[in-house]
Amino acid sequence: MSIETTPSRNPDDPEWERLVAGLQAEPADPVGDLPLVPEWTRDADARKAVARRAVRRARRAGRRWLARQRTDRGHVKQIARGTRRTHEWVVGFHGVHVQATAHQAHLATREARAAARRARYTLMPAQREKARQFAERAETQALAAIQLHEQARRKVRRGRLLRGGLAYGTPLIADTVAAVEFGGIGLAGGIAATLSVAAWIGRKPQTEETWDHERRSIGDGDRLDEPMLNQAYQAAKVIGGDQTLTMVMPCMLTADAQAWEAVFDLPGGLPTRKALNATEALAGAFGVAVQQFHQSRGDREGRVHLRVSLQLPFTGAPIQGPLLAMERVSLWESVPMGVNLRSESVWTSWVERSGLFGGEPGSGKSAAANDLLLAAALDPTVRLYLADGKAGADITPFEPIAAMYDTDGNPERLLEILTHIWEVEVPERRALAKEYGSRKLTAAMAARDPRVYLAVLLVDEWSSYGAAADRKTREECERLLRLIVQQGRALGIITLAATQKPDADSVPTGIRDILSIRWAMRCLTPQASDTILGQGYAAAGHNAQDILKSQRGVGIYMDGEGAEPELVRSYYYDDDEVELILERAHKLREEAGTLPGSGPSLADRLRERGTEGQILAVLVDEFTAGGDNVDWLPGSVLLNALRAVGLDVTPERLAALVVRSPADKKKREWAGSLVAGYPRALVFDTAQQLIERT
Ligand SMILES: Nc1ncnc2c1ncn2[C@@H]1O[C@H](COP(=O)(O)OP(=O)(O)OP(=O)(O)O)[C@@H](O)[C@H]1O
C-alpha cells in the first residue's frame, strides 16, 4: 500500500521527468533564510486569505459587541450594576446592627416607662420602694440602650462618610482635576474612566446566564491556539476538565492560509480512538462544520494530527488530473487518483489490488473509476474488460479499446466476459507464471516479456445485473467474480466494483471482503458507509454520510487493508478530456498492435520470424515503449535492450540488419555527447519488409 505525493521515478523516460519536475513546486525559501517568517506571508493568495480572516474577525467582534448590549453583560447594564453595587457598598450592611440597637433601646424605654408607672401607683411602702428601685434600674438600662443605638448610628454614619468620600469623592476630584487641567477632553476622559470602573465593578451579573464573552472559536475567525485546543477537547469530553493536551507541533496556519494544523498527544493512557470518535462534538466546540474538521492518527497511540479547514473543503471547481499531460502510463506503477485535504496528490499502485467504490447516485463513482480506467487506457499493454449494470453511458467512450464490454446491463454478456477471463485469461497467465517458476506475474517479468501484461475488470452496479439475471446466471456470475478477484489478483487482473447501493445484495459479502482499495463517496446512512469501508469505521469518525452533496467526487479513501482512511477528491476529467485521453490511448494501442480485434502486434508477428525477427521485435518494442516522440535511438540503447532479453548482438550485426544511408548514420546528440543511432522509421520499415518477405 502506498500513497505517493509525487510520482515515482522512471529514469529512462524524459517525459516522465518533465512531468515530475512540473509537479514539484519550487520551495518558497529553499535555503531557510527566513525561518521565523511564516510561510503564508510569501504567498499573495495566502496574505489575502489572512486579510480576509482579519476583516471577518473585526466584523464578528462588532456583531458580538452589539449582541452583547442586549444581554446582562451589555455595557450600560454593567455600569448601572456597578453604580448600584458601589452605592450598596457605601451604604453598607451595618443598618441591620443599627436597627437591632434601635429595637433594644425601644424595648428598654418601654420597660422603663412601665416600671416608672408601676412605682408611681404602688401604695404599700415596702413594695413601693422595691418598684422604685426597679424603675430606676430600667431607666438606666434604657439610657444605656439608647446610647448604644446612638453609638451604632454614629459609627455607621462615619463609615458611610468615609466610603462615600472614597467612592464618590475620588472620581469627583479626579474628574474635576482632569477638567481643570485638560478642559472638556479631560472631563470626558475622566467620566469615561469613572464609567469604565463602574462597568468593571458590575461586569458580572448576579444570575447565571448563557452568554460567554470568553468563548473563542475558529468559526468566528479566532486563531487556533493551545488554550482553545484544550478547551475544545475538554468541552467535547475527550479529556477531563483538569487535563491538558501535550503539543508535538504547535498550532499553525498552513502555507496556503486555508487551515489550522496541530499535532498533539492525548493525556497518558487515552487512546486516539477517543478523539476520533468525538468528531461532531469537537467540530461544534471549534465552531466549524464536521466537514471542516479532520483528525488522523499519528505514528503512535494517543497522538492526533488535527486539521481544521477555514472553509468547506472540496467545494470548488473540479481538479484536473495529471493524465492529461501524460503521453503514456505504466499501470505497473502508481497512478494519480485524486487530491487529499492537504492538497497532496494521491497516487495508488493497483498491482495485486482490487477495489470497491460506492456512494449514492451522482456522488462521483464513475469519475473516480475513470481515474483508474483512463490510466489503464494510456498503458497500451493493459487489457480492459468493462461491464456496466446500469446500462449508462459512462464506459461507452472506452468501447473501441476494450477487449470485451457490456454497456447494456445484460447479465448474459457479463457471464460471457467473466467466463472468458476465468477460462482463457487466468489459465494463460497461470501457465506464464509457471514458466517463470513463480506464483505471480510481476513488473520485472513484464519489462522483459511482452506476454506479461495487466488486465482491468470493471463491474459497475452489480445489483442491477443481479436483479436482471435468473438465479442460475446470478450464482454463476457471483462464483466467477469471486474466483477472478481471489486468484486473478496475483496474475495481474485488477478488479474494480462500483455500486450505488452498498449493501450485501449489491456486492456479495464474500467478494466485498477481498476488495482491498475502498472509496466511500457520499452515502445516505452510516451503515452504507460501513458496508464500503468496513464495520465500525463510521463510529470511529469515518462516516461518508458526513460528506455534503455539494462535495462531488469526494470520498473516504482507503488505499489497501489497514490503511488509515482519508478524505480524497478524485481527479475529474470532463467528456472532452476523456475523449482526448482515449484518442491518445487508441493511437498508442494501434501502434502497439493491442487494439482489440487487430490481431497480433507487429512485435509479436516479428517474433515468429526467426532470430532476425526477434531482434527487430525488441527494437520495435523499445521505440514503442518510448512513445510517439522517440523518432531516433542510439545504437547502444538498442543493443542494451537486446542484451536484456538475452540476445547478444554485435553493433556490426545490427548495422547489417537495419541498413542505414549515410544521412541516417549521421551522429546525433544524446545525453550530452554525439552518438550514432537508428531512426524509428527505418527500424519499422525494415521490420515490415521482413514480415512481407517471410
Ligand atoms: N472529482 C470530481 N470533481 C468535481 N465534480 C465531480 C467529481 N466527480 C464527479 N463530479 C460531478 O458529479 C457528477 C456525477 O458524477 P458521476 O457520474 O461520476 O457520479 P456517479 O456516482 O457515478 O453517479 P451514478 O451512480 O448515477 O452513475 C459529474 O457529472 C460531475 O459533474
Image (spheres, rainbow, N blue to C red):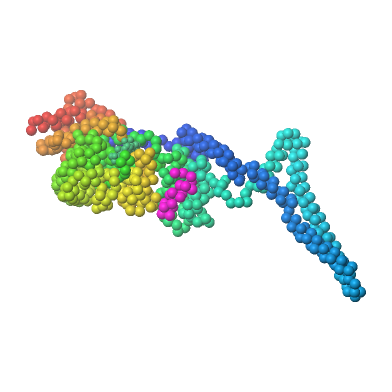
Q: Is residue 276 magenta?
A: yes
Judging depth in this view, the residue of 81 and 465 nearest the camera is: 81
Task: Pinpoint residue 199: horizontal percent, then vertical percent.
Answer: 66, 44
Residue sitting nearer the eye, 103 or 632: 103
Q: Is residue 280 magenta?
A: yes
**414 to 668, vertically: above or below:** below
**Which quarter of the picture shows residue 132?**
bottom right
Quadrant of the rendered image holding ligand 1: top left
Above or below, 527 against 347 in this view is: below
Give the farthest residue toward the bottom. Answer: 126
- Tell me which residue sits at (19%, 32%) in the image: 591
Magenta-drawn stretch, dominant element (helix, strand or loop)? helix
Task: Specify whether residue 154 is in view.
Answer: yes
Which of these two is toward me, 541 or 100? 100
Residue range (magenta):
272-289
Where does residue 364 sit, x and y in percent of width and height? 32, 40
Image-based side of 124 in relation to 368, left or right? right
Tally of numbered tags? 0
Residue 615 horizontal/vertical position (percent):
15, 36
Whether residue 643 is visible: no
